[in-house]
Image: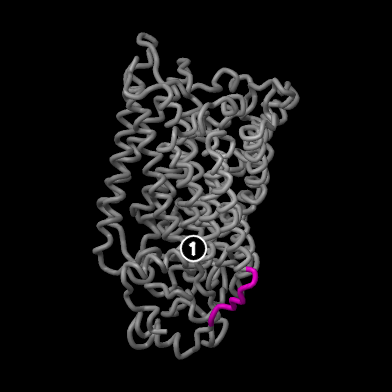
Amino acid sequence: MSSYTQKKGFGATVWDYITTVDHKKLAVMYLLAGTLFFAIAGFEALLMRIQLMKPNNDFVSAGFFNELLTMHGTTMLFLAATPLLFAFMNMLVPLQIGARDVAFPFLNSLGFWLFFLGAVFLHLSFFMGGAPDAGWTSYASLSLYSPGHGIDFYVLGLQISGAGTLISGLNFIVTIITMRAPGMTFMRMPLFTWTALVSSALILFAFPPLTIGLLMMLFDRMFGGNFFDHTMGGNTVIWEHLFWIFGHPEVYILVLPAFGLFSEIIPTFSRKRLFGYSSMVFATILIGFLGFMVWAHHMFTVGLGPTANAIFAVATMAIAVPTGMKVFNWILTIWGGSIKVTTPMLYALGFIPSFVAGGVTGVMQASAPLDYQLHDSYFIVAHFHYVIVGGIVTALFGSAHFYWPIFFNRMLNETLGKWTFWVFFIGFHLTFFVQHFLGLMGMPRRVFTYMEGQGWDQFNYISTIGALMMGVGVIMMVINCLMSIKGKPAGRDPWGDGRTLEWAIPQPIPFYNFRQTPLVRGLDPYWIEKQEGNKEGMTYAEPIGDIHMPNNSAIPFVISLGMFIAAFGALYNPDADKPWSIYILIGGLAITFGAMIVRSIKDDHGFHLHKEEILEIEEQLYGKGGNK
């Protein structure tokens, strides 16, 4: 067993990560993959902003601009923000609830590989005839008549990637409900775990409508299904309903974990318990519930009629109430606290006014007559970027600083972190604040150029300068991460004010997480143990004994690879000049189903770590005396 703590060669390490089912390694893989796609989507945004920097610009063509626009939105929401939040959910949720892994480690690995290979498939479109070009919402009237295979890449890539997300969401629900340590009641769970639970429930109900919509789009594009073709008796508006029944809960799938992350950062650096914990839990559940009642506010201009518009307007205004409860609770947590202004706390302090600004413009859109004027203008672009960047990206950056020691047992540089915050934060407001005025002045979104003399020139120029600053901020963040590789080990509770179980585990975290299952004696269990002078940081619910762990497996990767290969066959199957495509489709599906059959008949019961092996591993990790 001592081999678990020995250094491995490059090839062995790569194989270990391909076959791993350890939630901590999968969290690192989600973090790296999400960062890659975040950088790609950010680069696409910069190209668009450079094109719009001045009137009548010809930096990129109209067609390529549409591809950039589509891929930027699709990549940022599906392939960057979602996996980055899954990185934190994978790393933290089992540690926060006192579990040794997620409920289904095999499915955890399968979820990652489906997401990753689906994302890679989608991005190969740039090199194989053109990317999707119908906007990230891919409205049916545009996407049905889009030439080439761009939309087919969109449909197939998101189907594969979305299946991975759905699997992961289900996994977290089961994990949180069934694997909490003794004493970890629902009302003692850290708020991040609560937001992960509600977000996963939203995934469970929101992704099937998208899957059905994409399947119908697939049939329309490849087999002439005519679900959405109004000239053949179909209904274009049904696509909008299916997309937004998914699309609006998707906002909360992303923003609720971001709320949870800030609900961990703010009490830690205010050095006091989160104000109004029970009301925060209630607000989280209420936001999740109401998130499904508001999708048609994206469709006020479709012509649903005054009754439907009024109902969805009221529901949209109602959802501001639990969100407002959260904002006041964060402020009241800070109020009277012994505040340490660290880099994570800076992001939290910047997040509150930025997200409130995005929320206020959202309530404005709830008024159907005003939305009718502002719909498809740059005011909408400003609104949702204040929510997404001001809420989710600030949470990701702040939490990366906060939880870097949990991921890598290293600290990020605080000085560089604060510089990064100010460069990125000022750039963000420069970029999107002025876009509110562009929208009010009538600039439509999704246009690739504009004429002189409309009063838009200066604001677009300022917006592009801000976008370049945001790009510099991201580069500074990446440099900080790379610099941390040579830093000193952070050790347990490096911030000194950790409150929850993940900070109580010694560093580096062993692959089985907890030597003994912890006993939770209240909200913020690590804080309670510290106050009572318990140097181990945990009270144990059991004596040290054997631990059962799952085996690594390459089957999730093989299943996902088969889907990836089959997607190319499906992509080219309608083309008369490519008869070989059917063989690729069948071959890919054969690999997938073959791997599933192998999984079904293989008797894999995992392995047991005995007490002596655990003590040996901990002596190698922490020296004599184990983890004391």
- Looking at the image, which residue is at 49% across and 24% down? 379
Of 485 and 394, nearer the camera is 485
Q: Is residue 574 left or right of residue 86?
A: right
The correct choice, above or below, for 464 with respect to 108 in the image is: above
- Looking at the image, which residue is at 64% across and 47% down? 288
The correct choice, above or below, for 317 with respect to 83 in the image is: above
Pinpoint residue 504: horizontal percent, then vertical percent.
Answer: 44, 72
Of 230 and 95, nearer the camera is 230
Q: Secondary structure at mark 1?
A: helix
Pinpoint residue 423: horizontal percent, then vertical percent.
Answer: 29, 40
> Can residue 335 be seen from the camera position used here?
yes
- Quarter the N terminus occupies: bottom left
Q: Residue 604: within the magenta?
A: yes
Q: Is residue 445 left or right of residue 240?
A: left
- Quarter the C terminus occupies: bottom left
Magenta residues, start to end: 600-607
Tell me the kind of residue under disc 1: Leu
Of 231 and 256, nearer the camera is 231
Pinpoint residue 29: horizontal percent, then vertical percent.
Answer: 43, 58
User: Where on the picture, by quarter, is residue 308?
Assistant: top right
Pinpoint residue 315: horizontal percent, then vertical percent.
Answer: 68, 35
> Can residue 628 be seen from the camera position used here?
no
Q: Residue 477: within the magenta?
A: no
The correct choice, above or below, for 244 with respect to 307 in the image is: below
Residue carrying label 1:
92
Classed neighbour count for the residue bearing mark 1: other residues with Cα under 10 Å, few (<14), some (14–19), many (≥20): many
The residue sitting at the top extreme is: 453
Of 515 and 110, nearer the camera is 110
